[in-house]
Amino acid sequence: MATTGLVSVIIPCFNQGCFLATAIESVLQQTYPLVEVLVIDDGSSDTTAVVAARYPSVRYFHQPNQGLAAARNTGLHRSQGSYLMFLDADDWLYPQALTLNVRYLEQNPVAAFVAGAYELVYPGENQRKGQTPAIQPEPYLTLLARGNYLGMIAAITFRRWALEEFPFNASFRRCEDYELYLRITRNYAIVQHQELIAGYRIHANSLSADIPAMLRSALRALEMQKPCLRTPAQRKAMSQGIRHWKQYYYTLLCDVLLTRKGTVSREALLSLLAYSPLLFFRFYVFGSLHRYTTSLKRHLPRTVLWGLHKVGLINHFVPPVGQVAFGDLDRLTPLCANFGFTRGGAIDRYYVENFLWVQSPSIQNRVLEIGDNSYTVHFGGEKVTTSDILHVDANNPHATFVGDLSHAPHLPDNTFDCLILTQTLHLIYDFKSALQTCHRILKPGGVLLLTVPGITPIDPGEWRETWYWSFTDKALSRIVTDVFGQNQVQVQSFGNVHVAAAFLYGVGRSELTREKLDFYDPQFQVINTVKAVKSLSGA
């Protein structure tokens, strides 16, 4: 019998005792109160049992080595929680991981699981790379066509009933999570968000380092879906997915083969030859050329280097100093001076609307939106009982309240269930007072949904004279936490150098691919978002 509200965190471990303590402690430090930890020792011969014994609250189970999928199934059968998370022994959870994921499941009672964001962590290089899966309206089709876009399993929390119906396929030694996602999303809805849940440690001994075996497993997972495909769209997606996986793993293999970042086995080379003789010839025969691109860059003309880049012989082409080709961007004025609205829409709206779509369960009951109520209507729908609008202009016929958010004593205390404040805070000089007003007028448990610009053009028209601020994620976290309190604020950041440059030049939203929009580099924050919840005590 499952314990309602309890999260069972299952940590399979096979000879990774050196990492296990970090994984266990990351679970014990969770802000969510109802947690049990299970370590499933899958036939380890190292210190796994000794490390697990240091933690009296951890439930430890040993079994002969059967593989990761079987170990996870053992954890499923031994656990007691109504929710389950699977944390590999070499990874870890961030402190609010369980709180965030359980909250999303409670807000979406029909979802089989919830999937969040994670970080790739390269300990030896002191480097982190955020992975924020894009929110997809049709997860099953996306998994078929674009591979495992959901990624790290530790960023996912499952409902017990979903795994009891669809346990892990123990015949898979790799890609067992991808195969599971396909089966579940084919039959049930899921919920996705973009808040950081877990850290994924990158090291040479991980199972994903065996490239040919990973490719075989991914293609096998797709093949198992063939009898279930019912529509032309699904069959087309599967064909796209086969091409995606081959290209993805060919690229990884070629990085190893041609840059000598690691060793390449005879099996790997034969695998590449079997799947694509042309790629084998292209990458292997010209491998020696690629290995000397550092010196070649000093001697070959830019056009030759660019050509080598286009055919894949140089993965990361950086033109020499003085040879950058600016092309259409070689200009002193933007392509569109109005944020790209004349070229297919403003890029920042992509992030604003994705954020509100993810947070739409909070847009309910009585909602106050600044300026107009278009987002309230679109994302709240029938969940909204009363839609209010605050506007600074008394002549606005749709405003139910008029005034400046930084000084609005006429707005009633403890009134609104949700407050939508998108791309406005930077126009308010006394933004701290505006945030205090937001906190005051929200009901206990009410939610503020806030977006602000980071790297941005300045409005050339109506708002030019009151465009005061831009905010980083760190500044927002401190500012909003000062008002709403610790553990009540979730901040996210979006953007990369390509998106930032495109936005500054007025390139339209429709002119960028989703892959470019969804890639995140914290050095180039185009937009930042905040979800802040007023504590139930009202403090």
Image (cartoon, helix red, strand yellow):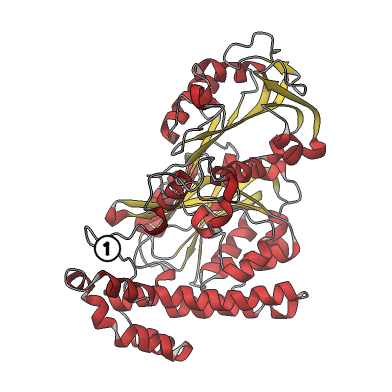
Query: Does 142 appear above or below 282?
Result: above
State the count of labels.
1
Percent across and percent down for residue 408 are 63, 11
Query: Does 464 appear above or below 180?
Result: above
Tag 1 secondary structure? loop
Which residue is pictured at 52% across the width and 24% down the height?
427
* Mark 1: few/some/many CA within 10 Å (<14, 14-19, 20+): some
Quarter of the figure that contains the C terminus: top right
Which residue, given by chain and number where applicable, does mark 1 sit on?
319
In this view, the residue in front, 476 or 62, is: 476
Q: Which amino acid does label 1 sit on?
A: Pro
In this view, the residue in front, 409 or 29, is: 409
Query: Does 123 appear above or below 458?
Result: below
Note whether residue 282 is visible: yes
Q: Is residue 379 left or right of residue 259?
A: right
Percent across and percent down for residue 2 are 70, 50
Please identify the quarter of the rendering in which residue 424 is found.
top right
Note whether residue 262 is visible: no
Which residue is pictured at 68% across the width and 68% down the height?
183
Percent across and percent down for residue 331 are 38, 49
In this view, the residue in front, 120 or 246, is: 246
Percent across and percent down for residue 470 are 44, 31
Q: Is residue 290 left or right of residue 92?
A: left
Name the outermost residue toward the top. Answer: 409
Which residue is pictured at 70% across the width and 37% down the height?
375
Which residue is pictured at 58% across the width and 36% down the height?
33
